[in-house]
């Protein structure tokens, strides 16, 4: 049997693989401190769970429209106006099986052989793989700590060719936690409009911000950039709904219709009763989001101080998401080797930077409890000092 060529062109998701390994070790009774997956440790808020339970009891258990429950699409369109100043109607929104799936749908709807997609590195592990599966070519643009791991407008302009179709913007960023300032977003928008490419703005971490920084949605900057923007977002991170698998894509009706056609032949609709939980998440009190954000802020502070106190590691202070991305270049070891040894010797699970196109870094998620953070940092310090 010969598998399809596309299988050998992509690698397994390291974020998922390492998380699964850490969980398997825990199941064996090993005391693992896991900072692997970006998965909030909180329960999904009670009113969200109650809404899904009610929908289940009411028999909302049937197939639904492929692009999502009309009420949820409307609620998302309202949210995009209120929170992000984006003028979308329900027909501009498709509900997908998580944020990852919204991006996957987009790549399949938009990208074909010969198309180039600009992805700033460090990047979230799945972006280039999705481009590959769609048959396109990722153009990776390296950034470093000197620009806060952010692509500059000059870098973006330089990497655009006649084949460029899409630019992937992710702020707050996974894996660095960095947030583009409004001026930086404006400068990137000018390049996108000027060169007439499309931008997908992955805003999954938009609610998880610190130190008073603001999230600016690139599409809100005017008609011309709005017409070239696609928004990807979801409920997993902000509402602690990772396992629910509910995300969405918003864009022109043409793109949303195309994504719906593809979704209609792959997953059909997202779990019907789960969508009612998502409606409650958007329409209910947002206090839960703020409570979780405040907990993340405390954890960020503790983890950052502990890491920067370890000789050989250095980490800039991120303003968003729930990741730290320390530089391990002084350790003179590849990131995968570092992470494997750390897991083996000290039972601490972190993700090697190579997964995100940055081999001199590691990623730690602090979406976990403070006791695990303290214990894990003790172990990390011991490990680094022994290297
Ligand atoms: N997005 C999360 C992460 O980066 C979950 C795992 C995944 O989908 O990659 O850890």
Image: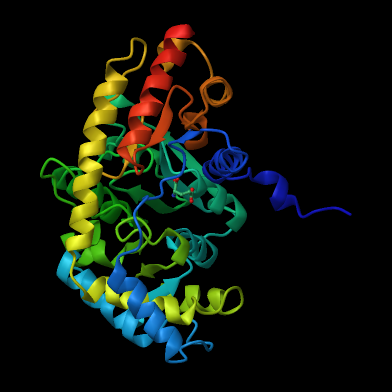
Whether residue 254 is visible, yes or no, is no
Q: Quadrant of the N terminus?
A: bottom right
x and y percent of residue 37 in the render?
46, 44
Residue 30 in which image quadrant: top right
The residue lying at 48 percent from left, 73 percent from top is 259
Residue drawn 24% across the image and 30% down it: 302
Q: Does residue 275 show up? A: yes
In the shown orientation, is residue 369 left or right of residue 161? Answer: left
Residue 253 versus residue 339: which sits nearer the camera? 339
Identity of the residue drawn at 56% across and 19% down: 345
Toward the bottom, the furthest residue is 58
From the viewer's perspective, tell me whether residue 132 is left or right of residue 252: right
Query: With respect to residue 258, does 144 lie above or below?
Result: above
User: Percent from the top left, x then y, of residue 257?
Assistant: 45, 79
What x and y, as percent, mark residue 205? 30, 52
> Residue 226 location, x and y as percent?
25, 65
Applied colour scheme: rainbow
Whether 350 is drawn above or below 10: the answer is: above
| Residue at image coords 15%, 70% | 82
Residue occupying the far left of the picture: 212
Q: Which sits in the foreground, 14 or 215?
A: 14
In the picture as drawn, the residue positioned furthest to the right comes out as 1
């Amino acid at each position: 049997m010969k598998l399809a060529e596309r299988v050998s062109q992509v690698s397994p998701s390291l974020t998922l693989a390492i998380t699964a390994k850490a969980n398997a070790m825990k199941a064996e009774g090993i005391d693992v401190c896991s900072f692997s997956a970006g998965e909030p440790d909180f329960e999904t808020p009670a009113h969200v769970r109650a809404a899904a339970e009610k929908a289940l009891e009411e028999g909302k258990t049937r197939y639904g429209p492929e692009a999502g429950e009309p009420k949820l699409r409307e609620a998302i369109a309202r949210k995009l106006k209120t929170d992000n100043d984006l003028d979308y109607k329900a027909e501009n929104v498709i509900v997908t099986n998580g944020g990852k799936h919204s991006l996957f749908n987009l790549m399949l709807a938009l990208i074909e052989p010969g198309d180039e997609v600009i992805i700033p590195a460090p990047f979230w592990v799945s972006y280039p793989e999705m481009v590959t599966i769609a048959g396109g070519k990722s153009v990776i643009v390296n950034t470093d700590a000197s620009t806060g791991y952010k692509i500059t407008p000059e870098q973006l302009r330089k990497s655009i060719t006649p084949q460029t179709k899409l630019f992937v913007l992710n702020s707050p960023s996974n894996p660095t936690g960095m947030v583009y300032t409004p001026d930086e977003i404006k400068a990137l928008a000018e390049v996108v409009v000027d060169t007439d490419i499309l931008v997908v703005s992955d805003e999954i971490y938009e609610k998880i911000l610190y130190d008073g920084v603001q999230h600016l949605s690139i599409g809100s900057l005017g008609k011309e950039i709005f017409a070239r923007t696609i928004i990807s977002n979801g409920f997993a991170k902000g509402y602690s709904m990772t396992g629910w698998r509910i995300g969405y894509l918003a864009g022109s009706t043409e793109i949303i219709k195309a994504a719906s056609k593809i979704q209609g032949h792959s997953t059909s609709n997202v779990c019907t009763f789960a969508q009612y939980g998502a409606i409650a998440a958007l329409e209910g009190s947002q206090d839960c989001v703020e409570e979780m954000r405040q907990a993340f802020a405390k954890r960020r502070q503790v983890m950052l101080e502990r890491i920067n106190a370890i000789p050989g590691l250095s980490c800039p202070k991120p303003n968003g998401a729930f990741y730290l991305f320390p530089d391990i270049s002084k350790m003179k070891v590849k990131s995968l080797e570092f992470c494997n040894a750390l897991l083996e010797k000290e039972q601490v699970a972190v993700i090697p930077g190579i997964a995100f196109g940055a081999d001199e870094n590691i990623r730690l998620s602090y979406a976990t409890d403070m006791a695990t953070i303290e214990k894990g940092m003790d172990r990390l310090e011991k490990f680094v000092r022994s290297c």
